Amino acid sequence: MNLRQMSAFVAVYESGSINRAAQRLNVAQPSVSSLVQKLESDLGTRLFERLASGAKPTAAGDTFYRHCQKVLAEVDAARKSISGGADRVGGVVNVGLAPTAAKGIMPKFLADYLGEHPEVELQIAEAFSGPLTEWTLSGQVDFAVVAVPPIDRRLVTRRIASEPIVLVSSPDWAHDHAHAGPLADGSPLKLVLPSPRNGLRTIIDLYIHANDVPVARSVELDSLYGMLEFVKRSDWVTFLSVTAIVNELERGEIAMRPTDPPLELGFYLIHPARRALSTAAASFVERLVEGFAVSKAEWLRRPPLQAARRSSTRAAR
């Protein structure tokens, strides 16, 4: 068994075809077929069922794939450590972030991170969970932070944070509709929603349906900044996680009330299972996790209902 055989096996497993695997590896089809056959001979078992439509993994193939991911990730980590120097933090880091993380967490540590690591070339893209997952699988980003975790064996998925989702409104609306208790008991909402492309939409839809939250009218708007600006100036409301609104809340531009029953949004780190994060990427993730923890701790120390009333009072002045 060698790394060429394992790489060929992984390519066939992920592409579902020896021909497609050969194209992906940029080698001849007979070469890939030979590598897989030698691997099966060495292991003494069939890893694929050869079908007219392609190659379907056997139970042994599924098990071996998980082992290959770990081995190839370790080899990748060793290569990065030796080629870049064990203590060097540098190189290009491509990051994909959900809008909430890009707006609420990243700006708080980014300048310090870049100052401490002058050899890092950072490239950051903001998108919803679906595109971020596709970019991670295709290698366009080294890792991503998403709100909806994908179910894909090609990816390592780790929950790194969670935080409350709250009802966000203008201070005037909060003053006129101030009441505690379940949202189902309140007046019907004019609700601003992200489109179904945003993973938050599914969470909100399920919550509204499960808890009989009354909605008078809804509009779809995918821009986080546009959504907040609209809510500030109208009697429309929306649901957002606390990190996305903390700056506007502190400036008295918006108000919020906790959801009743409570609702939370999780954040997940995803990256290819067969590639290790570089030291620079791991350092960025560490800062991001710390940022989420600090943000949540600050939020928990804040009396939520009083925060909304302070915002309303400040706006009235």
Image (cartoon, rainbow, N blue to C red):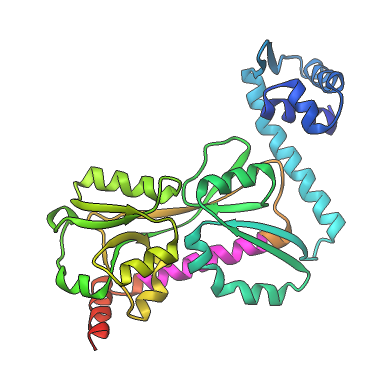
Identity of the residue furthest to the bottom in this view = 317
Residue occupying image coordinates x 26% and y 81%: 310
Residue 212 spot, x, y in % from top left = 19, 46
Residue 147 spot, x, y in % from top left = 47, 51
Of 49 and 124, nearer the camera is 124
Residue 121 falls in which quadrant of the image? bottom right
Extent of the magenta region: 282-299
Of 234 and 149, nearer the camera is 234
Residue 64 can be seen, yes or no? no
In the image, residue 131 sits, relative to residue 94, either above or below, namely: above
Q: Is residue 74 left or right of residue 182?
A: right
- How many labels, in total? 0
Residue occupying image coordinates x 57% and y 49%: 132
Residue 194 can be seen, yes or no? yes
In the image, residue 300 sits, relative to residue 72, either above or below, namely: below
Type of secondary structure dominating the magenta stretch: helix
Residue 186 spot, x, y in % from top left = 14, 58
Of 200 and 86, nearer the camera is 200
Of 312 and 84, nearer the camera is 312
Residue occupying image coordinates x 34% and y 67%: 230
Residue 185 falls in which quadrant of the image? bottom left
Residue 115 falls in which quadrant of the image? bottom right
Q: Is residue 85 left or right of residue 268?
A: right
- Was residue 295 drawn as part of the magenta stretch in this picture? yes
In the image, residue 228 sits, relative to residue 80, either above or below, namely: below
Q: Is residue 67 left or right of residue 181?
A: right
Q: Is residue 19 left or right of residue 165?
A: right
Residue 263 spot, x, y in % from top left = 31, 54
For the C terminus, the quadrant is bottom left
- Was residue 98 drawn as part of the magenta stretch in this picture? no
For the N terminus, the quadrant is top right
